[in-house]
């Protein structure tokens, strides 16, 4: 086995930045917890998921010294201060790891049922993750627990979930259960999700995570104080963006212009693209005006995301407001109306009923600026290379009203969302289900969960870092991406510690740069006057109902009027906009705002 540093770089970075995970939920925190993780985290592996090899016994792991006592007894010279030495030895997933050192959860094989959703392409490939996933196959063999999957395509998930609730016959474990509820506490009241905190002794690894990274617990706690899901945690915690604009850098070079930083600069660039290159879609406008990704509105200090409530917080008054009836939204619509009238937006943009741009527009070189997510960047590069080998793409962050993006809306980041595993009260052995869910947070298994078996799904590089390979990068299923192959042979759905950068190997330089260069925010935080509603502002049942009832009609009307205002079907002036605002306000808007305000006020009380 190649000698290497324990636990993937993910956990090493976390150890330095966050004080990271407790090894066994012992309650230790800070540097002691970080040392415990690094010193006791072997990463498993076997040559086959069905029949792991029986390697030699793993070398004895040296117990870590007590960091605090050492600090009190000695004062080493600065030049002697080094990173703690990491003991060598096989880790889970390595060819030399002895899986027999892990104790099963039960002596006699037990079965748990799981409601499990998959994207349609993966649901079409397998009837159950047990078919091909090395993780589920290995965990069944090692822990003696079989998972009987009730697997459905994400396209049918909502309907299937509702039928399950109506029948009252719940699976033991439900993946993404909270995504189907307006408030998480409703899931608890329905018995769909029990409180993990009541079974803390059965989840020591997960409780260690909550202790070491308090932001996670803050995001997970419901209004009534429950933690109802084992979430998918993307670590390390960092500010990244996986969606933004691409721009034709070769066109910019030819017209002698820079990447636009402001709306006015973007206008001038689009005009140049139209005039010099005949672009019919200088900027590919989303068909619903309000972007599916909330793009283009942030510089106005507002949210304008399709199918979202678009409530924001006025940081000067502390009041929750609806962005899509504000004066800034009027300016936002007026800008698009002007661009539409000038021919900078295709007059038939409403017929392009896809969130991502029609590839024909890009391949025919009819556009110079369009939205992309990180994974599609190379697709667009290859598409253009086939028609124009001189085409060069670059990244463009969302513009602002000025180059410093003054007043850009403050973003709110949720560390842990509503996805992952929940355990229903219908489960006959809740404690066993808790222990099974908890193994996914065992730091000794983090590398195995992310990378699988050495020689089968990954190899170590020259720096001792695991890199996906084997059947993940070369399989006979015709899977087009590492993510899809990972979803078949390992796992992408559920609750566990997920290495955010595990797929970086399939990204090129432009895609790696996108993580940070697509981030847009005000240079001077003092100029920021608005923010999104924080994830911690949780509503109770009656508040959620008030928002849901009002905003269902309001969001539909907002989207309709946005199209009419931009295309000229409805005049856009102060009088017509005032009538629109009055109409929206008459649709029970204040009841929804009052409900959101109550939730925000409670949130402020918890953080002050």
Image (spheres, rainbow, N blue to C red):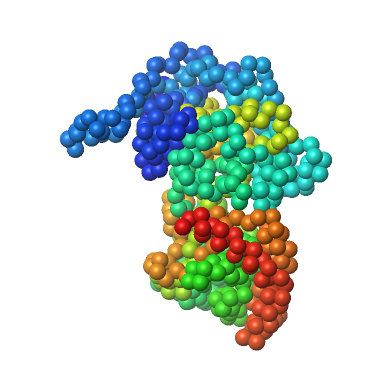
Q: Nearer the viewer, residue 353 or 440?
A: 440
Residue 304, percent from left and from top: 59, 67
Is residue 357 positioned above or below 237 on the image? below
- Which picture quadrant has residue 192? top right
Q: Is residue 527 visible?
A: yes
Q: Nearer the viewer, residue 491 or 414?
A: 414
- Which picture quadrant has residue 19? top left
Is residue 443 positioned above or below 260 on the image? above
Q: Is residue 506 visible?
A: no
Q: Which residue sits at x=24%, y=32%?
A: 72
Q: Nearer the viewer, residue 19 or 252?
A: 19
Q: Which residue sits at x=51%, y=45%?
A: 216
Is residue 515 positioned above or below 197 on the image? below
Residue 522, percent from left and from top: 42, 66
Residue 151, percent from left and from top: 72, 37
Q: Which residue sits at x=45%, y=36%?
A: 21
Q: Which quadrant would the N terminus be assigned to in this image?
A: top left
Q: Which residue sits at x=46%, y=62%?
A: 520
Total numbered circles: 0
């Amino acid at each position: 086995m190649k000698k290497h540093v324990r636990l993937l770089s993910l956990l090493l970075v976390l150890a330095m930045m966050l004080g990271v995970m407790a090894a066994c939920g012992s309650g230790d925190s800070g540097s002691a917890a970080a040392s415990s993780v690094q010193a006791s985290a072997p990463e498993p592996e076997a040559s086959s998921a069905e029949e792991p090899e029986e390697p030699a016994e793993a070398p004895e792991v040296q117990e870590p010294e007590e960091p605090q006592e050492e600090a009190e007894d000695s004062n080493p010279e600065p030049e002697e201060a080094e990173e703690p030495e990491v003991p060598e030895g096989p880790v889970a997933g390595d060819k030399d790891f002895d899986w027999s050192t892990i104790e099963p959860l039960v002596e006699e094989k037990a079965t748990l049922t799981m409601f499990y959703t998959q994207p349609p392409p993966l649901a079409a490939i397998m009837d159950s993750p047990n078919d091909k996933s090395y993780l589920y196959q290995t965990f069944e063999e090692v822990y003696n627990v079989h998972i009987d999957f009730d697997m459905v395509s994400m396209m049918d998930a909502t309907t299937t979930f509702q039928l399950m609730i109506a029948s009252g016959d719940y699976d033991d474990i439900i993946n993404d259960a909270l995504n189907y509820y307006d408030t998480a506490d409703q899931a608890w009241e329905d018995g769909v999700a029990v409180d993990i905190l009541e079974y803390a002794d059965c989840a020591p690894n997960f409780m260690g995570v909550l202790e070491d990274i308090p932001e996670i617990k803050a995001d997970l706690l419901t209004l009534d104080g429950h933690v109802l899901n084992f979430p998918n945690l993307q670590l390390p915690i960092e500010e990244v963006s996986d969606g933004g604009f691409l721009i034709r850098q070769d066109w910019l070079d030819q017209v002698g212009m820079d990447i636009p930083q402001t709306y006015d600069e973007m206008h001038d660039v689009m005009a140049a693209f139209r005039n010099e290159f005949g672009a019919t879609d200088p900027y590919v406008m989303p068909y619903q005006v309000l972007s599916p990704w909330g793009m283009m509105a942030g510089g106005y200090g507002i949210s304008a995301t399709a199918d979202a409530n678009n409530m924001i917080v006025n940081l000067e008054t502390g009041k929750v407001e609806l962005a899509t009836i504000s004066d800034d939204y009027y300016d936002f619509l007026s800008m698009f109306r002007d661009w539409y009238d000038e021919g900078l937006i295709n007059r038939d943009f409403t017929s392009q009923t896809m969130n991502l741009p029609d590839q024909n527009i890009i391949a025919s070189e009819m556009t110079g600026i369009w939205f992309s997510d990180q994974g599609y960047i190379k697709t667009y590069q290859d598409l253009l290379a086939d028609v124009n080998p001189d085409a060069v793409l670059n990244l463009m962050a969302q513009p602002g009203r000025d180059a410093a993006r003054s007043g850009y809306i403050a973003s709110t980041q949720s560390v842990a969302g509503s996805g992952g595993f929940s355990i229903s009260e219908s489960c006959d052995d809740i404690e066993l289900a808790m222990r099974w869910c908890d193994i996914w947070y065992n730091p000794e298994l983090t590398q195995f969960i992310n990378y699988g078996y050495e020689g089968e799904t990954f190899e170590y590089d020259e720096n001792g870092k695991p890199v996906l390979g084997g059947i993940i990068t070369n399989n006979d299923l015709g899977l087009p991406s590492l993510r899809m192959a990972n979803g078949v042979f390992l796992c992408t759905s559920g609750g566990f510690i997920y290495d955010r950068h595990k797929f970086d190997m399939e990204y090129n330089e432009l895609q790696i740069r996108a993580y940070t260069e697509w981030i847009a925010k005000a240079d001077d935080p003092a100029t920021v006057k608005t923010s999104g509603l924080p994830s911690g502002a949780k509503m109770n049942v009656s508040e959620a109902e008030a928002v849901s009832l009002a905003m269902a009609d309001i969001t539909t009307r907002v989207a309709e009027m946005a199209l009419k205002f931009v295309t000229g079907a409805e005049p856009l002036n102060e009088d017509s906009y005032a009538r629109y605002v009055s109409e929206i306000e008459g649709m029970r808007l204040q009841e929804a705002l009052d409900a959101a305000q109550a939730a925000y006020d409670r949130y402020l009380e918890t953080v002050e």
